[in-house]
């Protein structure tokens, strides 16, 4: 005899399906953004790649732009895992600063994040979404730097939260300038100079 699911069970199943669809949309959009190097994506393209109906994007995110913000920062957070691995491999603080800066400026997710920042500036309703993801990025960076500095015996010349915000403000600002069409390359920006991580012995 087949038992019917109770109402709470049915609601839980619906919520789980909704979360899975939402996650699939974000992950698919992040992948497409990375493959297209930040190029514009249509609702139809995203929906087709994710295997959903176009109106589900509006249902779960309110707008395509909101989805793009979520996806851009998901891609960035995934990329920061590689950045952390690079940081852990540095034998000294000077190498850490240099390698981290070089790697961040080459992140494939930066063009999409620049687009997300521009959207947050242009549309007030997206600003809280952008801020939510920025705060998550800052906290993740703070934890990483705190752990690394503690394990290596290094130190910072300013509070770790200021260190993280200063670094990412410079990196994302550069990405936003590039998104706006400003000429220049990563060599024009001393991103490593925004980091104050140094050896405990006083060597920079």
Image: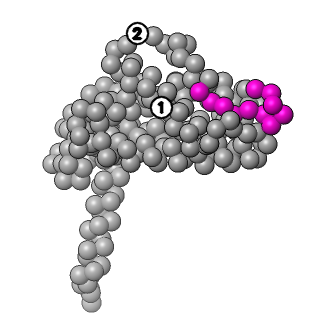
Rendered image coloring scheme: one colour
Q: Quadrant of the C terminus?
A: top right
Residue furthest to the front = 158
Hey, which quadrant is residue 179 in on the image?
Answer: top left
Q: SS of the residue at dot 1?
A: helix
Is 62 included in the stretch rendered in magenta? Answer: no
Q: Nearer the viewer, residue 204 or 12?
A: 204
Crowdedness near tag 1: few (<14), some (14–19) or many (≥20) residues, C-alpha within 10 Å: some
Residue with the mark numbered 2: 183
Residue 184, percent from left and from top: 45, 10
- Left or right: residue 76 versus residue 68 is right
The residue at 41%/45% (across/down) is: 133
**Vertical comparison of 196 with 181: above or below:** below
Residue with the mark numbered 1: 169
Q: CA distance from mark 1 to mark 2?
A: 19 Å
**Vertical comparison of 10 with 107: above or below:** below
The residue at 26%/84% (across/down) is: 6
Is 195 included in the stretch rendered in magenta? Answer: yes
- Left or right: residue 199 versus residue 43 is right
Q: Nearer the viewer, mark 1 or mark 2?
A: 1
Residue 91, percent from left and from top: 78, 32
Q: What are the residue bounds of the magenta stretch? A: 194-204
Taking the image as drawn, is residue 140 in sight? yes
Q: Earlier in the sequence, mark 1 or mark 2?
A: 1
The residue at 62%/30% (across/down) is: 195
Residue furthest to the bottom = 1
């Amino acid at each position: 005899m087949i038992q019917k699911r109770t109402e709470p069970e049915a609601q839980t199943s619906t919520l789980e399906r909704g979360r899975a669809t939402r996650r699939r949309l974000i992950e698919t959009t992040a992948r497409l953004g990375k493959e297209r190097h930040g190029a514009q994506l249509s609702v139809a393209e995203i929906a087709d790649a994710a295997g959903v109906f176009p109106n589900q994007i509006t249902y779960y995110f309110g707008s395509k732009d909101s989805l793009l913000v979520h996806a851009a920062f998901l891609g960035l957070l995934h990329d920061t895992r590689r950045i952390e691995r690079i940081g852990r491999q540095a034998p000294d603080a000077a190498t850490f600063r240099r390698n981290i800066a070089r790697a961040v400026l080459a992140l494939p997710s930066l063009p999409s994040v620049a687009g997300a920042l521009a959207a947050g500036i242009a549309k007030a309703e997206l600003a809280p979404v952008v801020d939510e993801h920025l705060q998550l990025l800052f906290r993740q960076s703070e934890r990483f730097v705190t752990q690394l500095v503690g394990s290596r015996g290094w130190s910072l010349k300013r509070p770790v939260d200021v260190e993280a915000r200063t670094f990412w403000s410079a990196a994302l600002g550069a990405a936003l300038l590039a998104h706006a069409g400003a000429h220049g390359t990563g060599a024009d920006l001393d991103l490593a100079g925004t980091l104050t991580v140094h050896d405990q012995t006083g060597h920079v």
